[in-house]
Image: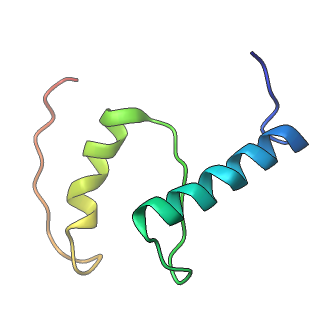
Amino acid sequence: MEMSHRGKEFDAAIKKAEVDLRALLAVLDTHEVLFLQGGATTHFAAVPLNLCAFPSDPIDFVVSGS
């Protein structure tokens, strides 16, 4: 199936997905819901950055080759 991310069909689907996700996880209106591509590799790369309290916090990481 091909669908443009700018099309009205996709817009309706993504809006419904956000409404359903907010209801399922009780996400408040004060928070944004982001749908990002990248899968587990991107997710696990972002975790250390989200644990920093401030942008100037030092972090260490290992480049494992994956």
The quadrant where residue 58 appears: bottom left
Q: 10 and 25: which one is in front?
A: 25
- Residue at x 71%, y 55% (from the top left corner): 15
- Residue at x 51%, y 57% (from the top left corner): 21
Q: 23 and 15: which one is in front?
A: 23
- Residue at x 53%, y 84% (from the top left corner): 30
The quadrant where residue 43 appears: top left
Rendered view: 28 above or below 1: below
The quadrant where residue 18 appears: bottom right
Type of colouring: rainbow
Residue 54 point in image, percent of width and height: 26, 81
Residue 63 point in image, percent of width and height: 15, 35
Residue 9 point in image, percent of width and height: 85, 39
Of all residues, the one furthest to the bottom in this rendering is: 30
Q: 24 and 29: which one is in front?
A: 24
Give the side of residue 36 with respect to residue 41, left or right: right
Residue 61 point in image, percent of width and height: 12, 48
